[in-house]
């Protein structure tokens, strides 16, 4: 199974820790963020992994080489010339992700106990263009899902903005869910990403793309019934929580 790890971010929220390294190489519980994600993916059966790089990208290349790519089939999508954001980053990595099987996309600053194989299988079962991990958590920007968990739009609570069609979204009984930083995508997406790039330019985010396409294609939200832990470790205030989350506890094997 294939996966893409976003490891190209500048890590501005974690400065000064990222003044001399990429965010993905900030250590938590004795290991870089990137290693935690790689090991979680490998444990779930993902054996073909692409990693995008930008800020101090050579550090990531050297780290992977020093660990023999963790025994996995690894590819580097090099964005050191231009950081492409999430949508542009997926399109840049197309040569390794295209084909006849879905691929999982994982932010390097998200750690969780989510069952990644179940997430992947849910996407396969529903044959969506993309399946997005969503969570009930407080934020300003929400994805809007209908009763069947189909993506219908997006809203910004601070500005009152709705997309893609405010008149059709206002007043509907839609679930407001926050993006969880993971998604599973069908390679059928690439022609639509190419078309979107021609409109928006090389650098673009994936969420506005999803919102623009949800009227025409099935894009699912995924929020499993089972409890799982989830943490955004890309900001200083959550690093201490991440240490507690990841360090083994007496009587456990984690």
Image (spheres, helix red, strand yellow):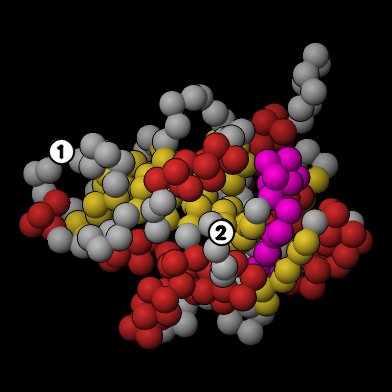
Where residue 45 sits in the image (x, y, percent)? 70, 45
Q: Is residue 52 magenta?
A: yes
Q: Residue at x 72, y 33 (%)?
A: 246
- Judged left or right of residue 30, residue 90 is left
Name the spot of residue 40 as percent of width and height, x first.
70, 42
Mark 2 or mark 1, which has the lower sequence index?
2
Highlighted range, magenta: 39-54
**Is 180 part of what is drawn in magenta?**
no
Q: Quadrant of residue 63?
A: bottom right
- In front of the other: 158 or 245: 245
Is residue 253 in view?
yes
Q: How many marks?
A: 2
Crowding at dot 1, Cα within 10 Å, few <14 / some 14-19 / many 20+, comes out as few
Residue denoted by label 1: 173
Mark 2, other Cα within 10 Å: few <14 / some 14–19 / many ≥20: few
State if disc 1 and disc 2 touch (CB < 8 Å). Answer: no
Q: Which residue shows up at 61% across the image and 50% down it? A: 109
Does residue 253 lie above or below 9 as drawn? above
Residue 27: image location, x then y, percent: 77, 48
Indicate the position of residue 32 as horizontal and vertical percent values: 77, 50
* Placement of the C terminus among the 4 image quadrants: top right
């Amino acid at each position: 199974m294939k996966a893409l790890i976003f490891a190209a971010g500048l890590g501005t929220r974690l400065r000064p820790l990222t003044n001399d390294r990429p965010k993905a190489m900030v250590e938590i519980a004795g290991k870089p963020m990137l290693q935690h994600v790689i090991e979680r993916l490998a444990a779930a059966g993902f054996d073909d992994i692409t990693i995008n790089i930008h800020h101090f990208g050579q550090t990531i290349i050297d780290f992977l080489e020093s660990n023999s790519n963790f025994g996995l089939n690894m590819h580097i999508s090099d964005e050191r010339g231009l950081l492409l954001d999430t949508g542009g980053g997926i399109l840049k990595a197309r040569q390794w992700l295209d084909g006849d099987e879905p691929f999982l996309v994982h932010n390097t600053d998200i750690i969780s106990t989510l069952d990644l194989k179940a997430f992947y299988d849910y996407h396969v079962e529903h044959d969506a263009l993309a399946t997005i991990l969503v969570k009930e958590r407080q934020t300003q920007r929400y994805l809007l899902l209908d009763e069947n968990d189909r993506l219908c739009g997006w809203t910004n609570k601070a500005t009152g903005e709705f997309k893609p069609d405010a008149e059709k979204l206002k007043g509907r009984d839609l679930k407001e869910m926050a993006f969880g930083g993971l998604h599973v995508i069908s390679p059928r997406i690439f022609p639509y990403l190419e078309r979107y790039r021609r409109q928006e330019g090389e650098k673009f985010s994936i969420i506005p793309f999803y919102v623009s396409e949800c009227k025409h294609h099935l894009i699912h939200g995924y929020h499993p019934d089972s409890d799982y832990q989830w943490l955004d470790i890309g900001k200083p205030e959550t690093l201490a929580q991440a240490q507690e989350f990841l360090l083994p506890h007496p009587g456990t094997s984690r």
